[in-house]
């Protein structure tokens, strides 16, 4: 019984030492290029462009976008961020006019998510979906009885 305890302790110490040496290796992250880095604080002078998103230009003239995520502030360059913002709106997202409000539906793995907004309060993604839906409706000929 004592031999088992000593053997188990030896194996545990060896595993701990091996994991410790892997995490402290200086070459562990060399060559890995990150798209966004997690920051702890927002720089002074950052302008909030929308809720949870800030824009900051550093001393070198490079513009950075800071986004608040559940994991902290993520810093990306404006060029990388802009490519994501100009992407085509998701095909599974639909918009329907309901008076002065627009009702949105999006299919997710957990079911259909529905929400509505005033026409004057649409964000960029919602506006793109609404414009796509208007073009789609205008392009299809209406059947008259």
Image (cartoon, helix red, strand yellow):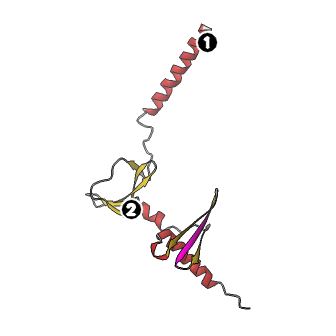
Please state, as top left, top right, bottom left or bottom right, where the C terminus lies in the image.
bottom right
Most foreground residue, 74 or 123: 123
In percent of width and height, residue 31 lies at 43, 45
Q: Residue furthest left?
A: 59
Numbered circle sitting on residue 78: 2
Question: How far apart in space, not on screen, are marks 2 and 1 (Cα)?
Answer: 58 Å
Q: Residue at x 64, y 56 (%)?
A: 110
Residue 51 pos. (x, y %): 40, 61
4, above or below 29, in the image: above
Q: Height in image: 10 above or below 31?
A: above
- Per the image, is 104 magenta? yes
Q: Quadrant of the N terminus?
A: top right
- Look at the numbered disc 2 and give the secondary structure of its residue: helix
> Which residue is disc 1 drawn over?
4
Residue 114 in percent (x, y) is at: 59, 65
Mark drawn on residue 54? none
In the depicted structure, whether residue 65 falls above or below residue 14: below
Q: Which badge, 2 or 1, is on the more N-terminal residue?
A: 1
Identify the secondary structure beneath mark 1.
Answer: helix
Based on the displayed image, in which of its 4 quarters is residue 8 positioned? top right
Magenta-drawn segment: 100-106
Q: Is residue 115 visible?
A: yes
Residue 62 visible within the image: no
Look at 50% across and 24% down and name the residue there. Answer: 16
Residue placed furthest toward the top: 2
Magenta stretch containing residue 108, yes or no? no
């Amino acid at each position: 019984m004592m031999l088992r305890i000593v053997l188990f302790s030896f194996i545990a110490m060896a595993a701990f030492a091996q994991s410790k040496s892997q995490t402290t290796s200086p070459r562990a992250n060399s060559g890995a290029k990150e798209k966004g880095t997690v920051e702890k604080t927002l720089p002074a002078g950052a302008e909030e462009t929308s809720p949870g998103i800030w824009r900051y230009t550093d001393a070198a003239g490079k513009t950075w976008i800071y986004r608040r995520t559940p994991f902290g502030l993520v810093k990306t360059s404006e060029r990388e961020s802009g490519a994501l913002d100009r992407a085509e709106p998701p095909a599974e997202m639909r918009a329907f006019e309901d008076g002065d409000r627009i009702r949105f539906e999006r299919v997710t793995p957990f079911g259909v998510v529905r929400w509505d907004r005033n026409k004057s309060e649409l964000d960029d993604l919602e506006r793109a979906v609404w414009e796509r839906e208007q073009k789609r409706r205008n392009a299809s000929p209406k059947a008259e009885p």
